[in-house]
Image: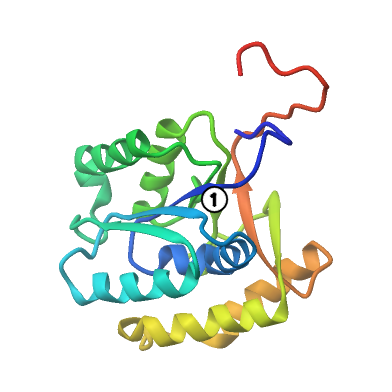
Amino acid sequence: MIRLGAGPLNRIVAVGAHCDDIAIGAGGTLLTTCLARPGIRIDALVLSGGGSEREQEEQAALAAFCPGAELRLTVDKLPDGRLPAHWDEAKASVEELRTETEPDLVLAPRTDDAHQDHRSLAKLVTTAFRDHLVLGYEIVKWDGDLGRPAAYQPLSTEIAERKVRLLQEHYPSQRHRPWYDREAFLGLARIRGIECSARYAEAFAVTKLTLNLGDEPCAYC
């Protein structure tokens, strides 16, 4: 949830089931935000890939996607594709993250993502971060699960191009995948840009949004 006009954006939590999820789904948003707010705190959690080359890729990539930010990244070692079977460990990681930060914004997978790891993490995030704005990012894949987003972050042409360049540069382990290319990333960004009257954009699902449009603060806030 978010209370409109509640204050500045100082802390962001970004979570992914796999290394590269955050960068693919919200890399342009992170670049835009970090460039506009030097020193912003980014707490990132990835549930799989720890101890492998994927973790090394993620460390370098998120450092590049969060220029000037105070970045803290944790990469766990849960098995790729088996997150539902490791629910307790995943839940413990998300809840530990919650105790360590009070974010103004949470970037996470969509709750209706077709990938079981993405979907499971999304459900954990919305229960751990109950009173926060949670934006569910999208990842294009063969499942054909892209929907109708509720929120958009416009991206300048420079940011969109920079995002694609960083994805190609920092995740060499993924270059062999047929969907992992410039056309896929820029194509989706162009479509989302059209939908919000911009050249490019990243789009997000929003499960709950609380507004505060009056002069008086909420008695329970």
Q: Position of residue 37 (x, y in %)?
A: 60, 59
How many dots with numbers?
A: 1
- The residue most toward the top is 219
Horizontal arrangement in the rendering, residue 169 relative to residue 7 (left or right):
left
Q: Position of residue 140 (x, y in %)?
A: 52, 69
Q: Nearer the viewer, residue 49 or 177?
A: 49
| Residue shown at 20% from the left, 45% from the top | 86
Here the colouring is rainbow
Q: Position of residue 51 (x, y in %)?
A: 15, 67
In this view, 43 is above or below 26: above
Q: Quadrant of residue 78?
A: bottom left
Instruction: Inspect this view and state whether residue 13 appears.
Output: yes
Q: Position of residue 132 (x, y in %)?
A: 54, 35
Amino acid type of the residue that numbered disc 1 sits on in the rendered structure: Gly
Look at mark 1 in the image and give the residue it sits on: 136
Secondary structure of the residue carrying numbered label 1: strand
Horizontal arrangement in the rendering, residue 140 relative to residue 157 (left or right):
left
Q: Nearer the viewer, residue 113 or 10?
A: 10
Instruction: Inspect this view and state whether residue 180 appears.
Output: no
| Quadrant housing the N terminus | top right
| Residue shown at 54% from the left, 56% from the top | 137
- The residue most toward the left is 51
| Residue shown at 59% from the left, 38% from the top | 207
| Quadrant housing the C terminus | top right
Horizontal arrangement in the rendering, residue 89 relative to residue 29 (left or right):
left
